[in-house]
């Protein structure tokens, strides 16, 4: 599904990613862990095509296509989704209008007619229930006045609406209390199919208690320095990152 | 007051190509920029007493109107162009402009209304303005079409007259209803009001006249469409609307001009008189040519619009969507002298590239329990400057007056400016006056968030801007609202690189 080879990327001329290799197959859940400043958020931003980052070397293949050649919106249409670490507020734009634009753009890309209003609202209701998102929030402006937990739920709600092939959850657990964490994680698990994959970026094991990874990677100084099974996350939980840093240096 | 600062330059090479794309879009966006090749009788450039007499003679005006024009002209001679607005207005050579251009004049022989040059008809057709009554939608809209200095056609005139409603060009009104015109012309905006009002009063050419008799609710939207076509001419239209007791009318105004490298002057006056319990809704979608991406050309739009709520319980509502013009200087106002009268001002003003706008309203509370609402939404992009200027005045006699003002500014990019100049002059201590203001910016993060969800940047700006302006757009009549929404998105295309 996703094949990243020797990916280098920089921001404002400073190299952050220094040769990433990563392969995610359909149905897999990968966790990416690492200390602050190791390049985790850069990796997710580069994959979805954030304009502040420049790819200087390497290749990314997504569903057989050259991902790096696609615009951010076409990457989305191809089925790539990012749950943002800090979802942005868009005053004046209701969630309904926002989601309808997103869904219909995706359908247009795939050669489908726009959804009729009643079908769309039905879909909204179904998916909202999945993440226990308050119906009032759907009538509010995008993320405006949402609490931290509501914002993250709203990300997973959008993920449910867009049904991506590959979802990247960038520190979705940050700022969540334990109940919100459970609801968000259960939402992600319900959306899981044998064809869809997930990359979970996190500092902590606790999200991985709910979303079980198949593979755990440790990112350090712009490189993946360690890859192992779920036991690696537990070990990091107990021992921190220092022992890995020492191994590398 | 908020001024966005210049900040970091784009170092990203990919972004630079985006900017090229952006420039292309901004240059292509004005789809009304064509010119019509039609025989137009244009009087020589220059302004003097002879020119004023010539315009009056061409229109076959009575003596009193010529007097009015000459008084205005002589008053204007003693005035200086106002410079208090937050605008940089290049010097205007009033002797280099032609003050009268008539595209309906055939080379020889007298003209009749059925003999409109087909090119003129085609022009309005191309602009989407229905001048064939049979083609108008049922219940549709009556149109007065003005090109340069002359009204070329007014539709549904006869049908409206059956109800006693007068809807015609102001020139025709002077001929057919001189008493009404004499009674009201200049009664709301005196020729002594300001520089451009004096100029307009001296040389005004065409515009619309509306009279709604007592107790009549106008059964269709009335509208005037203004088109500047000829080069080196100014358009000085004059509109007069009188709504007698217990009447209602909704009036729309639209305008466009060809793309030219020279600036064109448009100095109009709109006067509205609202009698007891009458209601007038006046909506404008202003889309004069704004100039190109480098700031060349565009219309100078210096307009005086004012309504007088004379009768008790009368109501006047201004709604404007301003996307065009190189420079806009315009303050549609309400004089609320009738007790319990109401004034409203809903405005969206968009400036992009090098456009400048200084626009707002004046709400003058003179009667008891008068109410006014001001909702102003400024949107600035490119290197433009956008100012809201508003006055709320409450007179000594205006017990229980209320005003609510909300002035919001939205900035796109880092090189534009948004400014708010609210003035208050309150002479009655029972008055309640509220003012709220916000400034926000469309951030790259917001746009990227939309992109990630599959929404293109252009569409994302459209969503955000229309969401921001919807309070005002919702006040427009249905068909206009749809047009205005599209116009907002188009005007801002490519404004965030």
Image: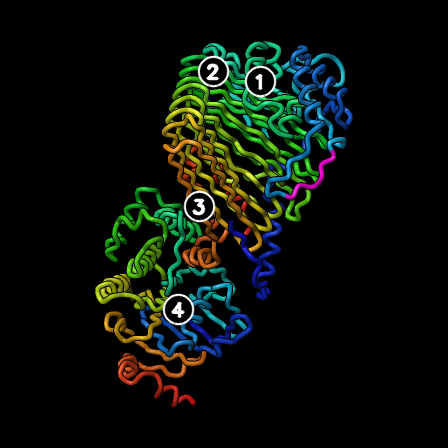
Q: Which mark is residue B185?
A: 1
Circle 1 marks a residue in which chain?
B
Do residues under tags 4 and 1 come within 8 Å of each other at their CB atoms?
no
Structural crowding at the residue carrying mark 3, measured as other residues with C-alpha within 10 Å and reported as few (<14), some (14–19) or many (≥20): some
Q: Which mark is residue B437?
A: 3
**Which image quarter holds the N terminus of chain A?**
bottom left
Rounded to the nearest whole Å, what is the CA distance between mark 4 and mark 2?
70 Å
Residue B277 coordinates in the image, percent (x, y): 39, 19
Mark 3 or mark 2: name the one nearer the start of the chain: 2
Range of magenta residues:
B88-93
Structural crowding at the residue carrying mark 4, measured as other residues with C-alpha within 10 Å and reported as few (<14), some (14–19) or many (≥20): some
Mark 3 or mark 1: name the one nearer the start of the chain: 1
Residue A114 coordinates in the image, percent (x, y): 39, 45
Circle 4 marks a residue in which chain?
A
- For the question of whether residue B139 can be seen, the reply is no
- Disc 4: which residue: A1
Residue B256 coordinates in the image, percent (x, y): 60, 33
Do residues under tags 3 and 1 come within 8 Å of each other at their CB atoms?
no
**Which image quarter holds the C terminus of chain A?**
bottom left
**Helix or strand or loop: what does disc 2 sit on?**
strand
Mark 1 or 2, closer to the camera: 1
The vertical placement of A76 against B425, above or below, is below
The residue located at (36%, 63%) in the rendering is A83
Do residues under tags 4 and 3 come within 8 Å of each other at their CB atoms?
no
**Helix or strand or loop: what does disc 1 sit on?**
loop
Mark 1 or mark 2: name the one nearer the start of the chain: 1
Structural crowding at the residue carrying mark 1, measured as other residues with C-alpha within 10 Å and reported as few (<14), some (14–19) or many (≥20): many
Q: Which mark is residue B212?
A: 2
Circle 2 marks a residue in which chain?
B
């Amino acid at each position: 599904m996703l094949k990243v080879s020797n990916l280098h990327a920089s921001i404002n001329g400073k190299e952050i990613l220094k040769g990433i290799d990563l392969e995610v197959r359909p149905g897999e859940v990968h966790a990416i862990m690492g200390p602050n400043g190791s390049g985790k958020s850069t990796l997710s931003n580069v994959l979805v095509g954030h304009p502040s980052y420049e790819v200087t070397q390497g290749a990314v293949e997504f569903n057989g296509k050259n991902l790096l050649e696609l615009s951010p919106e076409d990457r989305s249409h191809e089925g790539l989704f990012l749950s943002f670490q800090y979802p942005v507020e868009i005053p004046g734009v209701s969630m309904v209008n926002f989601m309808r634009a997103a869904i219909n753009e995706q359908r247009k890309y795939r050669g489908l007619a726009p959804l009729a209003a009643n079908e769309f609202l039905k879909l909204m209701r179904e998916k909202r229930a999945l993440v226990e998102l308050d119906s009032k929030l759907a009538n509010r402006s995008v993320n405006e006045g949402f609490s931290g937990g509501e914002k993250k739920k709203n990300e997973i709600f959008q993920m449910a609406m867009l049904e991506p092939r590959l979802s990247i959850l960038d520190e979705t657990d940050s700022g969540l209390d334990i109940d919100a964490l459970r609801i968000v994680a259960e939402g992600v698990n319900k959306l899981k199919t044998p064809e869809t994959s997930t990359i979970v970026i996190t500092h902590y094991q606790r999200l991985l208690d709910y979303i079980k990874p198949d593979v755990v990677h440790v990112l350090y100084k712009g490189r993946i320095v360690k890859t192992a099974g779920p036991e690696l996350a537990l070990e990091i939980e107990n021992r921190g990152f220092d022992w890995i840093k020492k191994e590398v240096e | 007051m908020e001024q966005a600062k210049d900040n970091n330059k784009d170092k990203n090479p990919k972004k630079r190509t985006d900017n090229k794309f952006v420039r292309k879009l901004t240059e292509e966006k004005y789809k009304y920029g064509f010119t019509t090749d039609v025989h137009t009788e244009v009087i020589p450039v220059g302004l003097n007493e002879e020119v004023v007499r010539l315009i009056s003679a061409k229109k076959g005006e009575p003596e009193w109107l010529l007097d009015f024009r000459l008084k205005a002209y002589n008053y204007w001679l003693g005035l200086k162009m106002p410079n208090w607005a937050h605008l940089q207005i290049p010097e205007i050579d009033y002797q280099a402009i032609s003050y009268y251009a008539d595209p309906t004049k055939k080379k020889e022989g007298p003209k009749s209304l059925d003999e409109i040059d087909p090119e003129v008809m085609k022009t309005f057709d191309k602009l989407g303005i229905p001048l064939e009554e049979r083609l108008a939608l049922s219940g549709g809209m009556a149109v007065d079409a003005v090109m340069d200095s002359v009204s070329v056609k007014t539709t549904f005139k006869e049908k409206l007259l059956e109800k006693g409603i007068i809807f015609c060009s102001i020139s025709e009104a002077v001929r057919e209803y001189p008493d009404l015109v004499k009674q009201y012309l200049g009664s709301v905006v005196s020729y002594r009001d300001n520089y451009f009002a004096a100029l307009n009063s001296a040389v005004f050419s065409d515009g619309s006249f509306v009279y709604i008799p007592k107790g009549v609710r106008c059964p269709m939207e009335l509208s005037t469409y203004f088109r500047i076509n000829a080069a080196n001419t100014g358009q000085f239209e004059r509109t007069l609307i009188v709504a007698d007791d217990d009447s209602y009318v909704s009036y729309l105004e639209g305008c466009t001009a060809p793309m030219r490298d020279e600036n064109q002057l448009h100095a109009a006056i709109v006067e509205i008189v609202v009698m007891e319990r009458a209601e007038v809704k006046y909506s404008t979608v202003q889309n004069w040519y704004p100039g190109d991406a480098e700031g060349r050309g565009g219309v100078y739009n210096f307009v005086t619009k004012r309504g007088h709520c004379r009768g008790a319980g009368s109501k006047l509502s201004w709604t404007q969507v301003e996307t065009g013009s190189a420079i806009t200087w315009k303050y549609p106002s309400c004089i609320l002298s009738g007790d319990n009268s109401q004034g409203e001002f809903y405005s969206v003003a968009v400036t992009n590239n090098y456009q400048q706008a200084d626009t707002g309203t004046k709400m003058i509370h003179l009667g008891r329990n008068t109410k006014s609402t001001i909702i102003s939404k400024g949107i600035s992009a490119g290197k433009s400057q956008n100012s809201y200027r508003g006055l709320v005045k409450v007179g000594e006699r205006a017990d229980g007056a209320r005003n609510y003002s909300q002035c919001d500014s939205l900035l796109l990019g880092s090189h534009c400016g948004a400014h708010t100049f609210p003035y208050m002059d309150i002479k009655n201590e029972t008055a309640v006056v509220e003012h709220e203001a916000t400034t926000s910016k469309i951030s790259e993060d917001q746009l990227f968030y939309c992109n990630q969800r599959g929404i293109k940047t252009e569409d994302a700006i459209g969503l955000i801007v229309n969401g921001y302006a919807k309070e005002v757009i919702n006040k427009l009549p249905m068909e206009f609202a749809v047009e205005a929404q599209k116009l907002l998105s188009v005007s801002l295309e490519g404004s965030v690189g």
